[in-house]
């Protein structure tokens, strides 16, 4: 099997079809990333719109041990939980060392976390050379549903 590296489209403005509210999330994530970006340490920022209209953010925090690293989406899920209102929309931005910025989808671990804690949200991602919003539940069509842990999925 040949593995072809995926090329992410360059984020050079607001994607077509993105609402004003989601464009605001994009601007907030980009601003956070530009302020805190460090190669190999803080390369992704996320902004979440909550049901009450407020916005929370998260920043990628890389650890030398790898496993202890925190994704921007995970950090934002925690902030949303503290905020006490459901998540409605998610935008995450990746910055490459060359300075280019790209809309990025959550990793598989974060997708599972979002399915449990932001079930009703939509998330923006790159699909080929375009951008679109999808339901969080579409990220992992066969997501694992945990039972018996209290408060989780049935």
Image: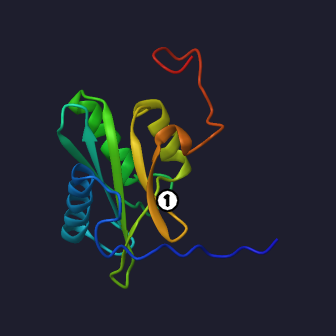
**Is the residue marked by circle 1 packed among few (<14), some (14-19), or many (20+) residues within 10 Å?**
few
- Residue depicted at x 27% and y 70%: 37
- Residue depicted at x 39% and y 38%: 121
Identify residue for label 1: 66
Give the vertical position of 115 relative to 16 (above or below): above
Q: On the rendered structure, is 44 left or right of 6?
A: left
Q: On the rendered structure, is 122 left or right of 8?
A: left
Question: Could you say where residue 36 lies in the image, as x and y percent from the top left?
Answer: 22, 67
Question: Could you say where residue 93 lies in the image, as x and y percent from the top left?
Answer: 35, 63
Question: Could you say where residue 24 lies in the image, as x and y percent from the top left?
Answer: 20, 55
Q: How many labels sit on residues?
A: 1
Question: Could you say where residue 26 lies in the image, as x and y percent from the top left?
Answer: 27, 59
Along the line of sight, the residue nearer the viewer: 70 or 12: 12
Give the vertical position of 29 relative to 37 (above or below): above
Along the line of sight, the residue nearer the viewer: 129 or 112: 129
* Extreme residue in the right direction: 1
Query: Can residue 60 be seen from the camera position used here?
Result: no
Q: Quadrant of the N terminus?
A: bottom right
Task: Choose top left, top right, bottom left or bottom right for residue 132.
Answer: bottom left
Q: On the rendered structure, is 79 left or right of 71?
A: left
* Extreme residue in the bottom direction: 98
- Residue depicted at x 44% and y 64%: 64
Query: Can residue 35 be seen from the camera position used here?
Result: yes
**Display colour scheme:** rainbow
């Amino acid at each position: 099997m040949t593995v072809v590296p995926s090329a992410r489209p360059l984020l050079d403005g607001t994607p077509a079809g993105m609402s004003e509210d989601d464009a605001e999330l994009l601007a907030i994530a980009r601003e956070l990333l530009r302020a805190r970006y460090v190669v190999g340490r803080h390369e992704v920022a996320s902004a979440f719109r909550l049901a009450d209209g407020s916005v929370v953010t998260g920043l990628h925090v890389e650890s030398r041990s790898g496993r202890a690293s925190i994704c921007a989406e995970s950090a934002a899920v925690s902030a949303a939980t503290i905020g006490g209102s459901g998540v409605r929309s998610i935008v995450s931005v990746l910055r490459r060392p060359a300075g280019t910025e790209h809309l990025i989808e959550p990793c598989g671990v974060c997708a599972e976390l979002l399915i449990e804690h932001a079930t009703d949200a939509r998330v923006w991602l790159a699909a080929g050379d375009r951008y679109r919003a999808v339901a969080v539940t579409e990220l992992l069509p066969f997501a694992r549903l945990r039972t018996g842990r209290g408060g989780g999925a049935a």
